[in-house]
Amino acid sequence: MCKEGLCLLLPPIVNCRADLMRSPSGADHAVLLDRNADMPEGVCFLKYQKICDDRGALIPMDTPDLPFLPKRVFMVEGAEGGSVRGGHAHRSARQLMCCVAGCVVVEASHNGQSVSVELVPNGEVLLIEAGVFATQAYRSPGDRLLVLSDEPFSEQSYLD
């Protein structure tokens, strides 16, 4: 059977531009979550369909339904419990963060506004736009974060 994550405590959001989130294919696989309140500009959640049966769960993320075409994909795994990664913003890169195991706490801030959210493997992903400062905290070595970026790696793109 399929169970939703237990540590989902996401605040509502309002400031994502829906036109950036619409699926180019017109499909309803990616949905901009209609949450309200204190999300910084440039931070928003998308929900992808979670298909469950007795074999487990499948969360399809077809490239036409992504907010951008990924040029880089990486996974963070095996981080010691309590370790923090990230700690920067990007000049122009956008990132889509998806927890694939465990629970990863993402703190994001932009223009004096901050939020802390927990990501779990439930089909909800976090879009971080360019210029948003973000850190990711890992509670246990089993936590896994998959990140898609619209730009290849470049240390020169970091804003500290």
Image: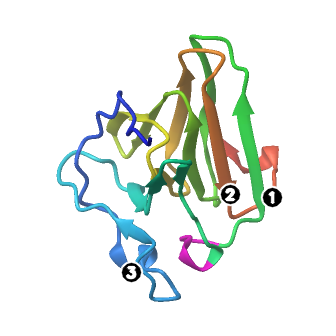
Residue depicted at 42% across the width and 79% down the height: 22
- Residue carrying label 3: 19
Crowding near pointer 1: few (<14 within 10 Å), some, many (20+)? Answer: few
Describe residue 140's horizontal placement relative to residue 150 as left or right: left
- Residue carrying label 1: 152
- Main SS, magenta region, reads loop
Q: Decide which of tag 3 and tag 1 comes sooner along the chain.
A: 3
Q: Is residue 7 above or below residue 28?
A: above
Asked which colour scheme the image uses, the reply is: rainbow
The amino acid sitting under disc 2 is Ser
- Residue carrying label 2: 149
Report, in whole angstroms, how far the alpha carbon at label 3 lies from the one at label 2.
Answer: 19 Å
- How many numbered badges does the structure rendering display? 3
Whether residues under marks 3 and 1 lie with C-beta atoms below 8 angstroms apart, the answer is no
The image position of residue 143, as x and y in percent, is 60, 26
Describe residue 74's horizontal placement relative to residue 108 as left or right: right
Q: What stretch is highlighted in magenta?
A: 64-68
User: Which quadrant is home to the N terminus?
Assistant: top left
Q: Is residue 108 above or below residue 93?
A: above
